[in-house]
Image (spheres, grey):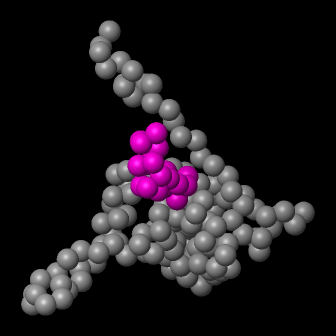
């Protein structure tokens, strides 16, 4: 038996998809808000999304020098879109019904209430492990 047997992939917990009612404006025939299905994003997928959301900004006082900055809002929008399993935000028929061309635009069209969109963003961030701040982790480590 390997000294690393506890760390083998077979012992890794599989993260199940979760259902969440995103908006009150999309309901079933009984008036109950529709449940959307969400999946966990891997660290590798998150990094790829983060790379897409980086932009270079000029460094003040240094001609020709730039630094990278994360467009956090764009990152959250793309993270949400990547997490949604159902409805399929890439479906052209669904996009066409709202007159949009991208999953992120479709999200904005389907969840057009700012409070609901913020709740959705918070749900997806928590689902993907962004629910504990760095300060909380420091406090936990102290105790």
Quarter-wise, where is residue 47 in the image?
A: bottom left
What are the residue bounds of the magenta stretch?
125-143
Q: Residue furthest front?
A: 143
Find residue 138 and report its horizontal and vertical position in percent: 41, 49
- In the image, 117 versus 104, the foreground residue is 117
Find residue 35 and report its horizontal and vertical position in percent: 72, 58
Considering the image in quadrants, where does the N terminus appear?
top left
Q: Residue at x 18, y 88 (%)?
A: 60
127 relative to 9 in the view: left or right:
right
Q: Residue furthest right?
A: 30
Dominant secondary-structure state across the stretch colored magenta = helix
Quarter-wise, where is residue 108 in the image?
A: bottom right
Residue 37 shows in this picture: yes
Find residue 76 and report its horizontal and vertical position in percent: 47, 68
Q: Residue at x 55, y 52 (%)?
A: 127
Q: Residue at x 68, y 57 (%)?
A: 20
């Amino acid at each position: 038996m390997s000294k690393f047997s506890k760390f083998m992939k077979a012992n890794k917990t599989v993260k199940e998809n979760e259902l969440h009612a995103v908006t009150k404006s999309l309901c079933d025939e009984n008036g109950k808000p529709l449940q959307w299905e969400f999946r966990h994003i891997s660290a590798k997928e998150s990094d790829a999304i983060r790379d897409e959301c980086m932009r270079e900004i000029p460094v003040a006082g240094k001609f020709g020098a730039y630094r990278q900055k994360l467009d956090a809002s764009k990152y959250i929008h793309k993270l949400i879109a990547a997490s949604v399993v159902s409805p399929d935000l890439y479906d052209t028929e669904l996009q066409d019904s709202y007159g949009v061309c991208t999953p992120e635009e479709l999200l904005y069209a389907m969840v057009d209430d700012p409070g609901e969109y913020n709740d959705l963003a918070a749900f997806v961030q928590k689902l993907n492990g962004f629910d504990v701040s760095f300060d909380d982790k420091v406090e936990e480590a102290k105790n």
